[in-house]
Amino acid sequence: MDTLMHVKIWGSADAADAVEQELFRLDKLLSVTGESSDVFLLNRGRRAQLSDEAAELLRSAIALSRRTDGAFDPTVYPLVQLWGFTEGTQRVPAQDELQAALDNIGIENIEQDGNAVTLKNGAQLDFGGIAKGYAAEKCAALLQTAGVEAALLSLGGNVQTVGTKPDGSQWAVGIADPAQPAQAIATLRFTGSLALVTSGGYQRYFEEDGVRYHHILDPETGMPAQSGLASVTVLAESGTLADALSTALFVMGLDAAAQFWRSSDDFEAIFITDDGQIFATQGAAVLLGDCEFQEISR
């Protein structure tokens, strides 16, 4: 999944091996570039019979795209390709190129009947904004079934905790400072199982003519989202939900994201603005350690 992953398990070495195998299996199944993956075959042929898991994830992705009014969109691959983020050939596209790609974007271009999926109007699927969260969720379920006492999965910007540490101490998960990503700007402390996913413009980017362009693309404009946010961290029981919403809320910007949270009951969030201010929803605020932040209330 094009990222460094760390897995720490209290319990069984066999369970650690099982998690590793599961991550490689899901990567092979969901990769947009792996030539044997469901996604690659669908994008190439525009029509495919997906596996049960890929079809399940697609249904979730479509539902989350509808819920976020398209701020999260699983059909952005034409834009991702155009910007060169997948192949490492980054460049700033011309406006006519952007418009041509935008014409292919939108979940209305997906027809799904069970596991049978057809892509219309040049649309292409990309699970890049949701697959790691889905994988973390699947691995957490695997570990719980195996009776693992506690685990910490760190899949790039996705963190998934399972259970409570044997010594009873809290999990401590740092949120990177967008201005200095090697340092934490805040720390969340809690017990139990939780998914935490961070999306930030500092994670993958390139510079051209003195301008920085990051990888979180706005499906409406085709450009890197300029929402006033430097990062968004979403906390939820579901890793799949947290992954998709971290992208969507980043695209929305603080005000719209806060309003979206007020109309929801299945996640909490922490926002860091371009000027370094921290905002936390009520449920997230109680988990924050010593740092200055403003609380978002209902």
Image: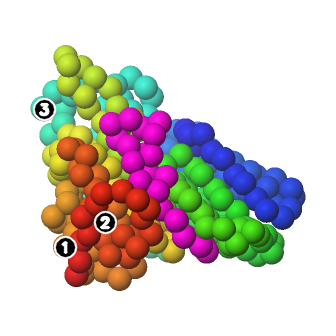
**Magenta region:** 174-195
- Position of the C terminus by quadrant: bottom left
The reply to whether residue 29 is visible in this rendering is no
Mark 2 or mark 3: which is in front?
Answer: 2
Q: Which residue matches tag 2?
A: 280
Circle on res. 259: 1
Name the residue rendered at 18%, 36% in the picture.
98
The quarter of the displayed image where residue 294 is located: bottom left
Give the amino acid at mark 2: Ala
How many marks the image carries: the answer is: 3
Task: Quote the CA–CA distance across marks 1 and 2.
Answer: 13 Å
Dot 2: element: strand
Element assignment for label 1: helix
In front of the other: 166 or 247: 166
Q: Is residue 177 left or right of residue 297?
A: right
Relative placement, left or right, of 270 versus 252 is: right
Q: Earlier in the sequence, mark 2 or mark 3?
A: 3
Q: Amino acid at mark 1?
A: Gln
Q: Which residue is mark 3?
A: 96
The x and y percentages for residue 133 are: 52, 60
Scheme of colours in the image: rainbow
Left or right of residue 92, residue 112 in this image: right
Q: Say which quarter of the image contains residue 257.
A: bottom left
* Nearer-the-camera pick, 36 or 193: 193
Residue 137 higher or lower than 156, as above or below? below
Is residue 185 rendered magenta in the image? yes
